[in-house]
Amino acid sequence: MFGLRKIISAKQTRLADAYTIENEPVSSIDLMERASTAFVNEILQEDLSNKKIAVVCGVGNNGGDGLAVARILQSHNIEAQPFLIQFKDKLSDDCQINFNRLEQVTVISSEKEIPDLSSFDLIIDALLGTGLQREAEGFVAQTINAINASGATVYAIDIPSGLFCDEITNASSVVQSDLVVSFQRPKKAFFFPENNAYIQQWRVVDIGLDEKFIQQQESHQYVLDEKVSLLVKSRKRYSHKGSYGHALMISGAYGMMGAAVLTSEACLRSGAGLVSSYVPKCGYEILQTSLPEAMCLTDTQYEHITSLPELEKYNAIGIGPGLGTNPDTIHVVSELFERINVPVVLDADALNILSTKLELIAEIPKNAILTPHIKEFDRMVGFSVNAQERFQKQQQFSKEHQCIVVLKDAHTSISDAQGNLFFNTSGNPGMATGGSGDVLTGIITGLLAQSYSPIEAALIGVYHHGLAGDVAAWQKGQYSMIASDIINNLRIA
Ligand SMILES: NC(=O)C1=CN([C@@H]2O[C@H](COP(=O)(O)OP(=O)(O)OC[C@H]3O[C@@H](n4cnc5c(N)ncnc54)[C@H](O)[C@@H]3O)[C@@H](O)[C@H]2O)[C@@H](O)CC1
Ligand SMILES: [K+]
């Protein structure tokens, strides 16, 4: 969808491997060599010449990759010592071939022989890959525990050993990796917050699996990455501010006017032709002084919003940042639902109001975009025991209410009414700071005003918000960056 890459299951990956082997065609051992070379090229971006490396290999194809990786590293004059953890008598065919291609492999055939790995600087984990069938236990679990206890940096091939590819893992022995270099696609498991301890960072390398075949697989999950820029339309040479829509931001309360300023400024920066900001009276001078590019309309009340302005002239509306949940403000949301006939973004206190008046959920306008963080989402739909359950509820909510949910987290997920789920890959923990969500709301509303469809606006907005956050973190550091740094680095080309 939209040219974004599908996320596929372990089973579908096996099918893609087999299809590529048969149709490219390429032998499976050459495909393994390609994957291992891609892994090595990725990790060699860093100087490993003085590192003492252990490559811990299993008996399947992940182990085969490991043995090939050890050999390729050695050919670069890097000290890489391969260990074969023989938890099964028979090696997979390609693992056996790679075993034979190495001069020296330390074979470990029982728990008692597991070496102390603490003398190594780097451990390459090639024990188990996407072929994991059950929780690791016994010999395999002990090896995983030894890797974790080593204190060495750990790079995992394809997926940390012991981690299930497509579902939540409730096991005690899973490799805690600093980096995963994954083949062709990130795995579904990379997007579960529960797996944070096992995956500090992941990257994907292309190993030439058949892309057309992968995209034809039945999957409703997508990677939201730089490919989203295909959706961004160029601005026409002969255009004027009227060509790019008029957005209305409804936000702010006494003591919360910063939210109104941030959300309105972000809306302008996302390219909206005109932005009007509707705020309580106390916000008039604040907004006019800090954001001269926006127009300002005020409520009759001084401290908080109690009514709505005329809505007819706007192309999109964003509501919620810093709005507060004063009893006089609550009815504004239901009134908006009755009167609105343009795309809308519901955020922050607009969502808190929804969770105090759950009957309002049934009235959410079709195609509305909701941007809750996890706590706000749970307040609306109930607590989920894990991310998998929450993603299901998110998809269900979108389908049932025909709306888009942007569930904000380290990997923000976006669900649409057709049941698709998109996982964002931009952004960083520096963005967990006050005002960052207000900025996102402004960006998405601004894109809606320019007549992007709601799902396009959500995808472009979420990705570029994260990207701007990444530039801000690079400039100021994750600790020091603040929400306005995200706005200042926004660049939707
Ligand atoms: N198939 C292909 O063409 C390619 C596969 N590649 C690699 O192959 C991996 C998948 O290989 P495999 O399918 O052989 O699977 P794995 O290497 O993940 O492991 C499979 C072996 O482990 C055993 N096993 C599974 N769970 C276990 C557990 N909990 N305790 C003990 N033993 C267990 C299985 O019975 C089998 O013998 C990928 O992750 C990737 O690294 C790459 O080489 C790229 C090409
Ligand atoms: K692995």
Image (spheres, rainbow, N blue to C red):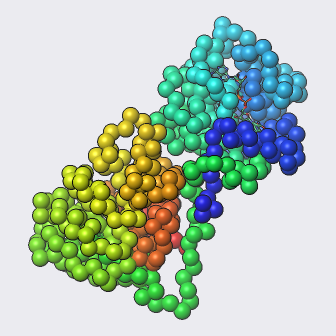
Q: Quadrant of residue 347?
A: bottom left
Residue at the extreme top of the image, as rendered: 112
Q: Quadrant of the N terminus?
A: bottom right
Closer-to-camera residue (362/28):
362
Q: Residue at x 45, y 78 (%)?
A: 450
Q: Quadrant of residue 403?
A: bottom left
Q: Is residue 55 above or below residue 215?
A: above
- Residue 400, image x, y percentages: 40, 53
Dividing the image into four equal quarters, which quarter contains ligand 1? top right
Q: Does residue 215 appear to the left or right of 398 in the view shown?
A: right
Q: Residue at x 30, y 57 (%)?
A: 362
- Residue 145, image x, y percentages: 57, 19
Closer-to-camera residue (405/118):
405
Q: Quadrant of the C terminus?
A: bottom right
Q: Does residue 179 appear to the left or right of 349 in the view shown?
A: right
Q: Residue at x 42, y 36 (%)?
A: 386
Q: Is residue 147 above or below residue 216?
A: above
Q: Is residue 78 above or below residue 318?
A: above
- Residue 298, image x, y percentages: 18, 78
Q: Quadrant of residue 167?
A: top right
Q: Does residue 358 appear to the left or right of 229 in the view shown?
A: left
- Residue 152, image x, y percentages: 60, 28
Can residue 100 be seen from the camera position used here?
yes
